[in-house]
Image: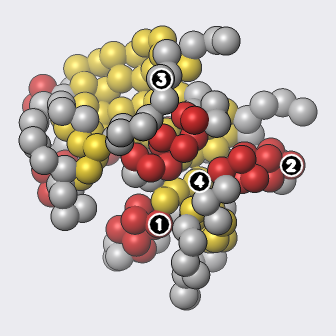
Amino acid sequence: MIEPVWHCHLAMSLDGKIARSDGSFDWLLPYPPQEFDIDDYHGGIDAVVMGRATYEIERAMPEWPHSKPVFVVTGRPIEAAPPLVEVRSGDLLAIADELPKRGYRKIGVEGGGQLVRGLIAIGKLDVLEMAIIPLVLGDGIPLFPAGTPELPLDLVKCKPKSGGALHVVYRRQSR
């Protein structure tokens, strides 16, 4: 069986925050995600794994942004979930075992630091693609919370974008 690629695409502030302390991300509005190849990312993945907080943010959008299977990692049930949304417990090893068996080869990761930390811990974060926004939030939700294991990465791409932002792509170093 071919090992799937786990690809995380997100935006963060210069000081490593993915949202303000209250979960808001108004500071991202001047930076359109299309400028950071979000459409290519969505077009290239087979399924999405996301945390509950990310699900709640995306569910509140006027239109559900996914047309592919979405697996929400949560311990609580989801009511009135959109089509193709499935709930999974926090057992990331079980999820990592299940998805390739179902034919998913490129798995998008959308979620907070807890999900990213967990995937790093089990060796399942292969690509980290980021919009790095030139803003120091100071306080907020970190991409890499305390306890995140070490992850050696190789730089694949670094491209300046409007407003001083950077679009970077890292790949996990071969073991």
Mark 4 nearby-residue class (10 Å; few <14, some 14–19, many ≥20): many
Measured in 3D between alpha carbons, the distance from the residue under mark 1 to the one under mark 2, in whole angstroms, is: 23 Å
148 left or right of 72?
left
The structure residue drawn at horizontal position 35% and vertical position 42%, both measured from the top left corner, is: 145
The structure residue drawn at horizontal position 40% and vertical position 72%, both measured from the top left corner, is: 56
The three-letter amino acid code for the residue at tag 4 is Val
Q: Residue 138's x, y, as percent?
A: 9, 41
For the N terminus, the image quarter is: top right
Measured in 3D between alpha carbons, the distance from the residue under mark 3 to the one under mark 4, in whole angstroms, is: 24 Å
The structure residue drawn at horizontal position 57% and vertical position 40%, both measured from the top left corner, is: 119
Q: Quadrant of residue 148?
A: top left
Measured in 3D between alpha carbons, the distance from the residue under mark 3 to the one under mark 1, in whole angstroms, is: 24 Å
The residue to which callout 2 is attached is: 101
The three-letter amino acid code for the residue at tag 2 is Lys
Name the residue nearer the viewer: 91 or 2: 91
Q: Who comes first in sequence, dot 3 or dot 2?
A: 2
110 left or right of 175?
left
For the C terminus, the image quarter is: top right
Q: Who comes first in sequence, dot 3 or dot 1?
A: 1
* Badge 2 vs badge 4, beta-carbon distance below 8 Å: no
The residue to which callout 1 is attached is: 52
Mark 2 nearby-residue class (10 Å; few <14, some 14–19, many ≥20): few
Say what secondary structure mark 4 lies in.
strand
The residue to which callout 3 is attached is: 150
The three-letter amino acid code for the residue at tag 3 is Glu
Say what secondary structure mark 2 lies in.
helix
Q: Who comes first in sequence, dot 1 or dot 2?
A: 1
Name the residue nearer the viewer: 60 or 160: 60
Measured in 3D between alpha carbons, the distance from the residue under mark 4 to the one under mark 1, in whole angstroms, is: 12 Å
Q: Residue 48 carries which label?
A: 4
